[in-house]
Amino acid sequence: MTDQPQETVSARPLRPLPGDPSMAEEVASMIRVDHAGEYSAARIYEGQLAVFGPDHSLTPVIRRMAEQEKEHLQVFEEIMSDRKVRPTVLNPIWHMAGFALGAATALMGTRAAMACTAAVEEVIDEHYQSQRDLLDHWDVEPELNKTVKAFQADEVEHRDTAIKHGAEQTPGYGLLSGGIKAGCRAAIWLSKRI
């Protein structure tokens, strides 16, 4: 008898195991965490804009990204309402933490603010891709998948914009980026569950 490796999508079994959440529960979790992520991203940009003010050279760039995040947030709020999906109970924490992260990195300078954006958006790109892989495999929720795909493209654009504006030239970029990415991954894990 030979052991055959189990197929996975983003380290998840392709076939549900006993005790695994149902697909409906998985989709509700996706919606909940995506709402939390868009909410947090909007708060990060609000923190950056509060520090930079209306006359900073990056303000129009940040404002445009913030407007897109708010549009994403509105869509997920409508989806949550339609499907009766509860938000994460951690939203009050993400409210404060998102703003604080945006303000803190803006206080460190324009490159640090852009390093924050690049790190956050890289994690969100990976996160959205793992959701799309799962939805594709299970061949469910084509409209949700289409929404996630469109928003993923915006997040990749935000990351590329941040890199174009000097994110990678931030002193200590690797450390700052790594810390922000770890925080984002932890927030995703928590928001899916709580």
Image (cartoon, rainbow, N blue to C red):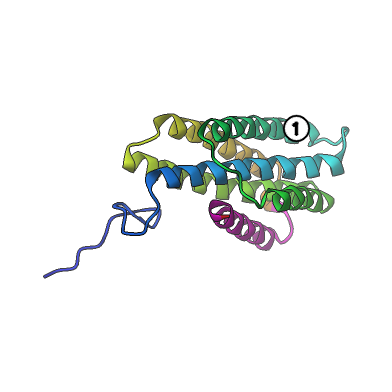
Q: Amino acid at mark 1?
A: Arg
Q: Residue at x 58, y 30 (%)?
A: 78
Q: Say whether residue 88 is visible.
A: yes
Which residue is found at the position 50% from the left and 47% from the top? 29
Seen in the picture, residue 174 relative to 142 is either above or below; the reply is below
Q: Is residue 126 above or below residue 153?
A: below
Which residues lie in the magenta part? 169-193
The image quarter in which residue 50 lies = top right
Query: Extreme front residue here?
Result: 84
| Residue 42 in the image, given as x and y percentages of width and height | 70, 39
Q: Residue furthest bottom?
A: 1
Name the residue located 37 percent from the left edge and 56 percent from the top edge. 20
Location of the C terminus (image quadrant) = bottom right
Residue at image mark 1: 63
Depth order, front residue of 138/29: 29
8 sits to left or right of 156: left
* Residue 172: image location, x then y, percent: 71, 61
**How many numbered callouts?**
1
Task: State the quadrant of the N terminus.
Answer: bottom left
Q: Main secondary structure of the magenta part?
A: helix
Q: Find residue 12 and report its horizontal and vertical position in percent.
A: 37, 56
Q: Disc 1 on helix, strand or loop?
A: helix
**Any magenta on residue 56?**
no
* Crowd class of label 1 (few under 14; some 14 to 19; many from 20; radius 10 Å): some
Q: x and y percent of residue 19 in the render?
A: 36, 59
